[in-house]
Image (tube, rainbow, N blue to C red):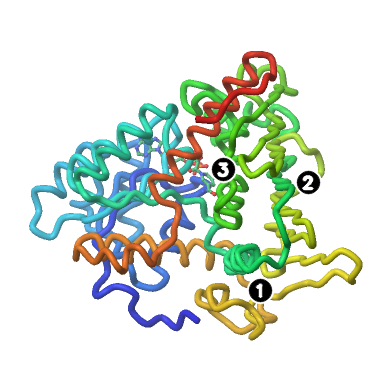
């Protein structure tokens, strides 16, 4: 259980690019990073509008001299200080991730980057090579991976509780964009514009989340080939899709599906991961993240609860409060940021044993997400055909 004991020797000096006032995801980055004093927010370039970003930084309580007009000024200004930043989080629209992450790594900084990591596998692999050559950590905020019940699911699959894995049913299918809300909502407008969003909308924006969860829960499953069909039900979004279905063949013989959608009218979030084995199934739903459904064929279904003594130790390690109290996305993200900080510190110390003990969405997870989107788009745009996944 987490009790606010130090997870790192001292807080890591940290900045944000993006995540300004009114942004969807800025606050949860700050909340997660600052929760257990693993990071100390000392600088930032928070907004596409320099003046608005600098005013916002000052209102967060930062030294106004360290609230910069843009990322380039941030990296240059901080590099010139003896107490400059050691890490940066990037919470800007997708099109900016690659150049900002590359500049950060070039300045020797550890990076936390939003998903999708970038637009192409070539770019993602360039970041991977750069991070390796500079010995820097890149964490990717697949935030749902911080939920303890995902660790429980992983441990149960590894223990053989399900038998042989046959099916992986994944979905992230919300209904918030079932009409052209982008006409009034800037945060949706860039998501349906390929110049800012990249080659996909829902595949990259939400489909990659359950895809990463399945990777954590059943790591032995490797995609062999896939078929994707994508549609733009709000026609003005074409060529970007607001709905997509992906079929996946794994090299074990297991089969998977991913439904990614923003037009699932009436649904709130509807992110679900269902793993079907030869003996039993597990299901996790992000709207009830403290429970895991365990269904053994021929027996009554069981609701496994967070925080209970019967859980695997990995699922108990990151609790913040006893069972029966609801934990949520803020705790999950804090768990993830704790691991990012531990990985950055272990990297700086050259502590390879500690690094090997940490599992978190790293640069390889970022590359994998981009590869999946790129392959889905290739399949869909060829008319929905099976393509090899390499
Ligand atoms: N991990 C998750 O669960 C999750 C959830 C939502 C969004 N995201 C990702 O986070 C990123 C941001 O999404 P959002 O919904 O918060 O977007 P948003 O449009 O709500 O906010 C973007 C913020 O970035 C700022 N910004 C834009 N360009 C900038 C630049 N060049 N320099 C500095 N600041 C800049 C904007 O002013 C704004 O404050 C996207 O990549 C998105 O995919 C991830």
Around disc 1, counting alpha carbons within 10 Å, would you say few (fewer than 14), some (14 to 19), or many (20 or more)? Answer: few
Q: Is residue 271 left or right of residue 12?
A: right
The tag earlier along the polypeptide, 3 or 2, is 3
Q: Residue at x 63, y 26 (%)?
A: 183
Q: Residue at x 43, y 27 (%)?
A: 120
* Residue drawn 53% across the image and 73% down it: 314
Element under disc 3: loop
Q: Secondary structure at mark 2?
A: loop
Does 277 sit above or below residue 7? Answer: above
Q: Which mark is residue 267?
A: 2
Q: Secondary structure at mark 1?
A: loop
Residue nearer the viewer, 152 or 241: 152
Q: What residue did someone put label 1 on?
A: 326
- When asked about the image quadrant of residue 14, the answer is bottom left
Query: In the displayed structure, would residue 125 be above or below residue 303?
Result: above
- Pinpoint residue 49: horizontal percent, then vertical percent: 36, 35
Based on the displayed image, in which of its 4 quarters is residue 321 positioned?
Answer: bottom right
Q: Is 293 positioned to the left or the right of 226 in the image?
A: right
Between residue 47 and residue 149, name the one nearer to us.
Answer: 149
**Is disc 3's CB within 8 Å of ligand 1?**
no
N-term mark: 3 or 1:
3
């Amino acid at each position: 259980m987490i009790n606010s004991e130090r997870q790192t020797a001292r807080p890591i000096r940290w900045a944000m690019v993006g995540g300004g006032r009114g942004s969807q995801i800025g606050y949860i980055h700050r909340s997660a990073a600052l929760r257990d004093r693993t990071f100390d927010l000392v600088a930032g370039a928070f907004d596409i509008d320099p003046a608005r970003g600098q005013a916002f930084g000052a209102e967060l309580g930062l030294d106004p001299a360290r609230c910069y007009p843009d990322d380039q000024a941030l990296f240059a200004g901080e590099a010139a200080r003896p107490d400059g930043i050691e890490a940066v989080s990037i919470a800007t629209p997708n099109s900016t991730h690659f150049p900002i992450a590359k500049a950060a790594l070039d300045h020797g900084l550890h990076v936390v980057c939003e998903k999708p990591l970038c637009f192409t596998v070539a770019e993602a692999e360039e970041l991977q090579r750069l991070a390796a050559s500079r010995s820097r950590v890149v964490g990717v905020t697949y935030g749902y991976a911080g939920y303890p019940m995902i660790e429980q699911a992983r441990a149960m699959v590894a223990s053989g509780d399900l038998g042989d894995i046959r099916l992986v049913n994944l979905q992230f299918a919300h209904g918030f964009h079932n009409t052209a809300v982008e006409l009034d909502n800037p945060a949706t407008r860039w998501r349906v514009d390929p110049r800012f969003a990249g080659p996909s909308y829902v595949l990259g924006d939400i489909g990659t989340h359950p895809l990463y969860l399945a990777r954590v829960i059943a790591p032995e499953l490797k995609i062999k080939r896939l078929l994707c069909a994508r549609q733009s039900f709000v026609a003005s979004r074409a060529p970007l899709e607001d709905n997509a279905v992906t079929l996946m063949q794994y090299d074990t013989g297991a089969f998977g599906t991913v439904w990614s959608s923003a037009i699932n009218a009436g649904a709130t979030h509807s992110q679900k991961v269902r793993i079907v084995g030869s003996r039993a199934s597990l299901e996790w739903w992000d709207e009830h993240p403290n429970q895991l459904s365990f269904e053994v064929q021929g027996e009554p279904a069981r609701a496994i609860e967070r925080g209970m003594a019967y859980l695997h130790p990995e699922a108990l390690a990151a609790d913040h409060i006893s069972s029966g109290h609801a934990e949520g996305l803020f705790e999950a993200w804090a768990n993830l940021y704790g691991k990012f900080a531990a990985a950055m510190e272990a990297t700086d110390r050259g502590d390879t044993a500690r690094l090997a003990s940490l599992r978190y969405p790293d640069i390889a997870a970022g590359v994998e997400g981009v590869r999946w989107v790129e392959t889905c788009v290739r399949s869909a745009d060829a008319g929905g055909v099976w393509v090899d996944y390499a």
